[in-house]
Image (cartoon, helix red, strand yellow):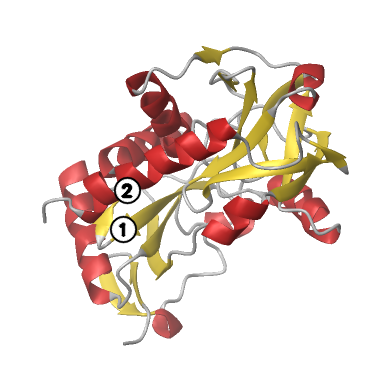
């Protein structure tokens, strides 16, 4: 089965999907996106993803092209048209095609693109070994809460990690943890799960929310507070969380061990809770 995508009202093979060079997403990065993991053909927390999509669209003053019911129908059809059971859905909405001018064009239809790729998550082996990360000053713009398609700063920051064989770049702004280049970051100290609060300097991850919900449900102590760089570097554990990485332990930061230099007890507790959630809620979800 060839890869089928959705573009402006049509499902078609990806090789046939074309947009104008004047699309404002191409010219200005003027648009937003979402990434939705799919387990056993069930989209993960779809309502929460669509709610975040709506917030991003409102933040850039772009009308939502579809109500949630139509998004759900289109997403379900796209999942059905692609072969794998576990998928990663990418939704991409731009301000559409118009002559190049910074000001918003009037009466221009938005561009809507969706594609599905096989979902590749962190392996059990990666979790058992742990991964390395580096750190850097958070030099992105001031509205990181918008899931904008203009991701050049994130690309550069992530590539810094790749260049040295690390998995992620942990970001600090004015001495405080924000997030990773493509993830949220959690810390653990003396059995307490520590999370930076949601603000304009971080994207509110759907997985971030689930981690906090699971912690509350299972009586794991949690503090949501601003975390200094010193506190992060002194943590017993650090975790990466995202829709595709799920939950992954950082055992080395800037060449120095995190805690004991291996995945900790708190990580394994949350990892197992997360896998149980996937199995019970996603794999066995009603059609």
Say above or below: 218 vs 127: above
Q: How many marks?
A: 2
Say above or below: 164 vs 265: below
Q: Residue 122's spot in the image, x, y percent?
A: 54, 57
Residue at image location 46% in from the left, 35% down from the top? 270
Upstream in sequence: badge 1 or badge 2: 1
Residue farthest along the bottom direction in this orientation: 1
Per the image, the residue denoted by label 1 is 39
Residue at image location 45% in from the left, 19% down from the top? 220
Where residue 253 is drawn, which disc sits there? none
Q: Quarter holding the N terminus? A: bottom left
Please tell me how crowded label 2 is: few (under 14), some (14-19), or many (20+) other residues with Cα within 10 Å. some
Residue in the foreground of this view, choosing between 71 and 2: 2
Q: Is residue 141 visible?
A: yes
Q: Is residue 63 visible?
A: no
Q: Quarter holding the C terminus? A: bottom left
Left or right: where 78 falls relative to 60: left
Q: Which one is closest to the eye, mark 1 or mark 2? A: 2
Q: Secondary structure at mark 2?
A: helix
* Residues under numbered marks 1 and 2 in contact, where contact means CB atoms less than 8 Å apart: yes
Say above or below: 33 vs 85: above
Per the image, the residue denoted by label 2 is 278
Q: Secondary structure at mark 1?
A: strand
Spatial CA distance of label 1 from label 2 is: 8 Å
Residue in the foreground of this view, choosing between 208 and 270: 270
Q: Residue 153's spot in the image, x, y percent?
A: 73, 45
Left or right: where 125 falls relative to 114: right
Residue at image location 38% in from the left, 60% down from the top? 89
């Amino acid at each position: 089965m060839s890869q089928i995508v959705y573009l402006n009202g049509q499902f078609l093979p990806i090789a046939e999907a074309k947009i104008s060079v004047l699309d404002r997403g191409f010219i200005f990065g003027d648009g937003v996106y979402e990434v939705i993991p799919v387990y056993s053909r069930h989209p993960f927390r779809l309502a929460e993803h669509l709610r975040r999509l709506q917030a991003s669209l409102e933040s850039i003053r772009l009308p939502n092209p579809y109500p949630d019911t139509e998004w759900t129908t289109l997403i379900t059809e796209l999942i059905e048209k692609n072969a794998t059971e576990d998928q990663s859905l990418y939704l991409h909405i731009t301000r559409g095609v118009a002559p190049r001018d910074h000001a918003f064009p009037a009466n221009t239809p938005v561009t809507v693109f969706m594609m599905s790729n096989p979902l590749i998550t962190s392996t059990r082996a990666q979790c058992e070994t742990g991964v390395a990360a580096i750190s850097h000053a958070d030099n992105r713009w001031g509205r990181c809460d918008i899931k904008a398609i203009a991701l050049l700063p994130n690309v550069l920051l992530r590539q810094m990690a790749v260049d040295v064989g690390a998995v992620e770049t942990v970001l600090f702004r004015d001495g405080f943890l924000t997030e990773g280049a493509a993830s949220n970051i959690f810390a653990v100290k003396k059995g307490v799960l520590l999370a930076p609060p949601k603000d304009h300097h971080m994207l509110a991850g759907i997985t971030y929310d689930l981690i906090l919900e699971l912690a509350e449900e299972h009586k794991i102590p949690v503090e949501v507070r601003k975390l200094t760089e010193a506190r992060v570097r002194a943590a017993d554990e650090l975790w990466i969380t995202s829709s595709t990485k799920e939950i992954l332990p950082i055992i080395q930061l800037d060449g120095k061990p995190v805690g004991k230099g291996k995945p900790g007890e708190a990580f394994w507790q949350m990892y197992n809770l997360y896998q149980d959630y996937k199995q019970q809620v996603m794999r066995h979800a009603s059609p």
